[in-house]
Image (spheres, rainbow, N blue to C red):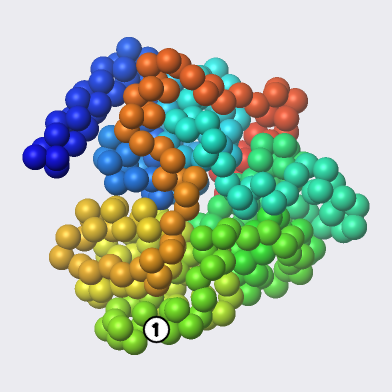
Amino acid sequence: MVNEQMSDSNQTIKEKIAELKRELRATIVAHNYQRAEVQDIADFVGDSLELARQCTEVDVQTIVFCGVRFMAETAAILNPDRTVLLTETSAGCPLADMISADELRRWRQRYPKASVVCYVNSPAEVKAESDICCTSANGVQVVNSLENDDILFVPDQNLGHFVATQTKKHVILYPGYCYVHHRIKPEQLKQAKKLHPEAQVLVHPECRPEVIALADAALSTSQMLRYTKASPHNSFIIGTEEGILHGLRKENPDKSFYLVTNSQICTDMKKTTLEKVAQIMELKQNIVTVPEEIRVKAKRAVDRMLAI
């Protein structure tokens, strides 16, 4: 009875969201780490790079962003004439919070000859102080596209290390990290492999180097989705935020997926609910804007990435 009531309630909220979407001429985009029911009502689900691209290609007035603040900021940077709504006001990113524009300027003074490659998991003002942005999917490609041999990579040290292993560039690492990926330990992965010896291991490049060394591949979330769909293997151990399991299982109903640990949860990503999506749309609240001076500079760094 309780499950039936919850199902009826969710259906009512979904119908309200659909109505509001028509009224606002909106598109709803969601990151792969969002709750399953939030992913299911989105027009597009993807990783940071895909969402950045998608927001520039839709003919709408409003972008409803189910994710965290830096992602909605990126949408606002690329779409100054559209309204961007972030579905949860307090949804931030602890990794992005590890660096500020002032801190990056200090690091640039220490390494004045280095080009700055900024992971998109960063605030708009940090992007504005950078030469080019990258995502976990294209970091190596971005670094190799630069003429400079010295690269200052901010803010994720694990992703930066992963990139450094695949380039001849001299990569200087800023000491930031994603707590969800950084907490995955090699011992935990070894135990998961003992439990599922037949499974391939796919981890995110934000994981520690020693975890990546034990994996069959280090991939972004969207790369994981494509890889598992094309793979002849039937079981996989996944080393990234647990929200990705929803998309993996939808795309591959006959395959098995296991997390390295049960602690792979980003609390900020899980703050968005169907109720909050409907509320934000109805009240037109939490509009994300970026000051024009910062937006123009940040857009230059994002555009350079998108052009590669």
Q: Seen from this angle, which residue lies furthest left?
A: 1
- Which residue is painted at 58% across and 33% down in the image? 73
Quarter holding residue 210: bottom right
Residue 305, position in %: x, y?
A: 60, 46
**Amino acid type of the residue tagged 1 in the rendering:** Gln
- The image shows residue 100 at horizontal and vertical percentages of 75, 44
Q: Quadrant of the N terminus?
A: top left
Q: Residue at x 22, y 53 (%)?
A: 250
Confirm whether residue 159 shows in the render. yes
Task: Tell me where residue 174 sits by quadrant.
Answer: bottom right
Instruction: State the residue in front, 92 or 130.
Output: 92
Question: Measuring 83% from the left and 43% from the top, which residue is drawn there?
Answer: 102
**Circle 1 sits on which residue?**
191
- How many numbered marks have been drawn onto this rendered protein structure? 1
Residue 277 or residue 129, whichever sits in front = 277
Question: Helix, strand or loop at disc 1?
Answer: helix
Does 277 appear above or below 176? above
